[in-house]
Image: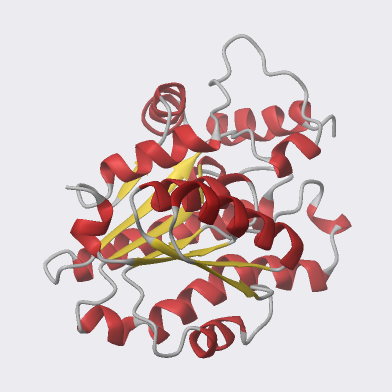
Amino acid sequence: MNLKSKYGNTALVAGASEGMGAAFSRYLAAEGMDLIIVARRGGPLQQLADLIMKEFAVHVTCIICDLSEATAAQQLQSAVYGREINLLVYNAGLSYIGAFEKNNPAHNLQITTTNIVTPINLMQLFSEQMIQKKLRAVIFMSSLAGFQGSGNLAVYAGTKAFTRVFAESLWYEWKNRGVDIIACCAGATSTPNFINTNPEKSNLFAPKVQTPEEVVKECFKKLGKQPSVITGTGNKVASFIMQKILPRKMAINIMGDATKKLYRL
C-alpha cells in the first residue's frame, strides 16, 4: 500500500524549497500525492513545484509564508482553507551556530517561533481535521543535536529537543485515533544549508553524512510504527553510546567539541 492509498490525496510540506523539504516533496509526489509546499522564498519554491509537476504529474500549490512570523500558522490555515490535508511534514527549522551571547535576541525569537511556536499552533489549528480523520499523518523534523546539551548550538538544540518530545507526546495521544505521528531525528545531512556552512571534514569515527533522500526514505519506513526514529546506522550507534554508555557530562563535552571542530569555532 502506498502513501496515497493509506493516508489520502494531499500532503503539506512546510519548509519545502530545498534540501530535506524538497526531498520530502519529491518522495510524496512519487507516491502520487498532490502537494501544498510552503517556504519563505517564492522563486525556489515555484521552481521545485514546476519540476515536480513535470516529473510526477501531480498538482502542486505553492504558499509563500515566513514560518518565523507569530501568525504563520494562521496564515497557512487561511491559505489552505477548504482543502483537506491528509499528511503534514513540518521540516522548517532555523539555527544559529556560534556562542550564545553573540547571537541577537531577535534572531533567537525567530528560531524559537519557527521551531516551536509555529508547529504548536499548526497542530492546534489542524486538530479538527485530525478529529475528523482527514489529517492522518504528521512528521516533525528533529535533530540529534537535541539529545543532549550541544555547545554553540544552544537555542537550536533546545528547540529540537522540544520537537522530539512534542512529537512523541502527540504520538501517544493520537496513536489509537487513526493518526500516525513521528519525530524524524537526523544527524549531519548534505542539505544546501549544511554545505553552505562549509563544515570541516568529519573524522574517521564520525557518523556518515546522509543525503536528504536517505533520511526521508527511512522516516517513511518507520511512520506508523514508532514515535520517533534516528536515521542512519552510524547515527543510531553514536546516539546509543552517547545516551546509554557515556556519562552525561562526557556526552555534552564530546558534542560541543565536535561542533567547534566541524565549524572551526
> In the rendered image, which quarter is residue 234 located in?
top left
- Residue 125 in sight in this render: yes
Residue 69 % position (x, y): 68, 80
Left or right of 32 in this view: 112: right
* 59 or 35: nearer the viewer: 59
Number of marks in the rendered image? 0
The answer to whether 100 is drawn above or below residue 170 in the figure is: above
Q: Residue furthest top?
A: 204
> Looking at the image, which residue is at 58% across and 36% down?
252
> Looking at the image, which residue is at 43% across and 31% down?
239
> In the rendered image, which quarter is residue 260 located in?
top right
The answer to whether 68 is drawn above or below residue 1 in the figure is: below
Residue 263 % position (x, y): 79, 32
> In the rendered image, which quarter is residue 140 located in?
bottom left
Q: Residue furthest left?
A: 176
* 249 or 25: nearer the viewer: 25
> Looking at the image, which residue is at 66% across and 61% down?
45
The answer to whether 69 is drawn above or below residue 59 in the figure is: below
Residue 87 % position (x, y): 34, 65
Left or right of 219 in this view: 73: right
Left or right of 103 in this view: 153: left
